[in-house]
Structures are given as C-alpha cells and as structure tokens.
Image (cartoon, grey):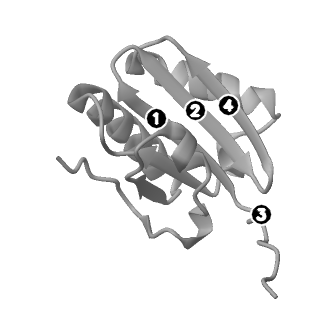
Amino acid sequence: MKKPEKFSTETVVLVDTTERDRTRLALIHGSKVIVIDKPLRAQSLQEQLEKLLKKDHQTFADIDAFAVLTKPGSLTGVRIGVVAVNTIAWLQDIPVIEVNSASFEQALRQPFSSLKKRKLARVRY
C-alpha cells in the first residue's frame, strides 16, 4: 500500500517570468499555496514579491528556497527572473532551485524538496 505523500514544511517562492507580459509568483508552504498572477512585465517582480510575502505575513527571513522557471519562454523575461532571484537569494543566503517545467501550473505540482538546490540558477537555452 502506498504511503500518503508528506508535504514539505519548507517555504518556497516560485517565480515565473517566462511570458513577455505576465509575471506569476507563488508562496508555497506545505499544502498552502498563495499565487499572484498579474499581466505585468518582469520588471515589476520585486514589487510583486513584496506583496506576496505581505499577503502571508512573511519576510525574506522566512523563505527556505527560491524556485525559478528557466525555460521555455521569453529569453529576456527568463533572464530578468533568474537574475532577480539570484540576487535576492545571494543577498539572503537562500538556495535557488532551477525549474524546467512546461508551465507554471506544472511547476506548482513538483515536490521542491526533492529538487537540487544551488547557489545560483542559470538560464539554459
């Protein structure tokens, strides 16, 4: 008999800037997921990240890892997302998870605790 999947207690922020005119963020903690999906360009990423954290009364100190979609999508958007995540993660000493999913929704279903954590994410095209 298969055991039920245990949810990780890690707090992960998922960042998706793969679409040119759309930025999506998710704050994932166990089975709780808060999503911000706005028709905004990646340049508004930091502002949207602050809103996401405030929604759940979190700070950067509460984040255990960042996950960022690294493809497929707009190369410029992906680069902005990766650079923003790398910068924040490096400043806060938080690991980064590269996510190569076909969609944001698919990425949300991944068990982040099983994915490799790095110091920096790379754009892979």
The image position of residue 63, as x and y in percent, is 66, 50
- Report the amino acid beneath label 1: Asp
**N-term mark: 1 or 4:** 1
Q: Residue furthest left?
A: 125
Q: CA distance from mark 2 to mark 3?
A: 18 Å
Residue situated in front as seen by the camera: 93 or 33: 33
- Work out whether mark 2 precedes mark 3 in sequence or the reverse, and give the earlier one: 3
Which residue in the structure is indicated by mark 4? Answer: 35
Residue drawn where x is 78% and y is 83% of the image? 2
In which quadrant is the N terminus drawn?
Answer: bottom right
Label at residue 107: none
Q: Quick one: label 1 or label 2, which is nearer the N terminus?
A: 1
Label pair 3/1, CB-CB below 8 angstroms:
no
The residue where tag 1 is placed is 16
Residues marked 4 and 2 touching at CB (< 8 Å): yes
Say which amino acid is labelled 2.
Answer: Leu
The mark that comes first in sequence, 3 or 1, is 3
Which element carries disc 4, helix, strand or loop? strand
Residue topped by disc 2: 25
Alpha carbon separation for disc pair 3 and 4:
18 Å
Question: Is residue 96 or residue 103 the one in the foreground?
Answer: 103
Q: CA distance from mark 4 to mark 2?
A: 6 Å
- Left or right? Give the position of 125 relative to 31: left
Say what amino acid the circle numbered 4 marks: Val
Q: Residues within 10 Å of mark 4 (few under 14, many from 20)?
A: some
